[in-house]
Amino acid sequence: MAPQEPSAGEALAASPAAGGRQVWRRLLARRAVLAAALVIVLLALIAAAAPLLSALEGQDPTSYHNDLLDSAAGGVPIGSFGGVGAEHWLGVEPGTGRDVFARLVHGARISLLVAVGATLVQVTLGVLLGLLAGLGSRLIDQLIGNTTEVMLALPSLVFAISLMAVVPSGFPRPLLLTLVIGLLGWAGTARIVRAQTLSLKQLDYVAAARLAGATRWRIARRELLPSLAAPVITYAAVLLPSNVIAEAGLSFLGVGVKPPTASWGQMLSGATTWFRADPMYVLLPSALLFVTVLAFTVFGDAVRTELDPRAASRLRVGTARGAAGPAADGPAPGTGAPDSARPGPSGTAEEATA
């Protein structure tokens, strides 16, 4: 009798935990993930080198060029494609004449810094409160749990607009955006960390550390945090594109980054009145925003699949079924199977035949 092949779940359970290098190797082996990673790296380099790139062009994001605008047409840039030329690589803004390329590269810096900073705030607060709820007393767990439910039920956009509107204008807007988005979005991370902590603290090695006299902080730092790394990194990868959208949305509504500071959302807010006269001014920031969110989403979904064993198992099982075809799912409808091949009470055809 031929040996049976292990199922996808058994193979996953039997295989050793993949290290960081193996995860990266599998991630970069996919073309879509590799393309998304290259886009993310390119955006990070553009954001870091924004002053150098604008200086290379010979422009800056705040200088006005009224001589490049057609005042008779209401301030539309002179020339085709929004005034594209050797001095202004992507043209100038209608109504102000500011260089579009310089504002786009500086806007990438604001959008990415706010998104990454807000994600760090969300993950830090979520991990701390989730661990406190999972390892603390019943009263602390209930208090943090109720607060988490309230934060999840709050209309975050409305509260973010309210907070951004009441803070004095002298406060740095990028820092304010980072704090507001982060403080309103930690609840999802806290819920995941609490659930994982409640499950992990029942395991033998955590009980052994507790019996050895380890404090709760030591248990959390030495025993729980390494096991929490995978779900936390997975959720952080999903939060990043959401935070990019949140920053752009708040700046688009006029409560985020204020002119003359460049931001993709702020550029889109100003472009709403020029989409017919100068379509390029609308398409450029919206295309960059779309590509950024798409790259982070593709990369985050791949990270989730690699670090979540259940997602990887479902993917493998689905791939195996798709490769096997309809025959793997049983006989075709209407054909039936002989009685000797039908499974008996124990579930195997051989036992039924015997």
Image: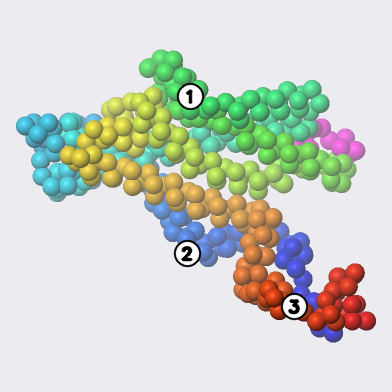
Q: Marks 2 and 3, Cα distance to the nearest angstrom?
A: 43 Å
Badge 2 marks a residue whose secondary structure is: helix
Disc 2: which residue: 31
Q: Residue at x 44, y 15 (%)?
A: 166
Q: Which mark is residue 158?
A: 1
Of residue 343 and residue 101, the one placed in the foreground of this image is 343
Q: Which mark is residue 200?
A: none
Does the magenta run of residues contain 93?
A: no
Image location (x, y in percent) of residue 326: 65, 74
- Residue 100 visible at all: no
- Of the residues under marks 1 and 3, which one precedes in the sequence? 1
- Do the residues under discs 2 and 3 have CB atoms within 8 angstroms? no
Mark 3 closeness class: few <14, some 14–19, many ≥20 residues within 10 Å: few
Of residue 275 and residue 65, the one placed in the foreground of this image is 275
- Of the residues under marks 2 and 3, which one precedes in the sequence? 2
Image location (x, y in percent) of residue 97: 17, 34
Image location (x, y in percent) of residue 74: 12, 31
Residue range highlighted in magenta: 210-222
- Furthest toward the left, the residue is 72
Quadrant of the frame with the C terminus: bottom right
Does the magenta run of residues contain 216?
A: yes
For discs 1 and 2, the disc positioned in front in the rendered view: 1
Q: Which mark is residue 336?
A: 3
- Furthest toward the right, the residue is 354
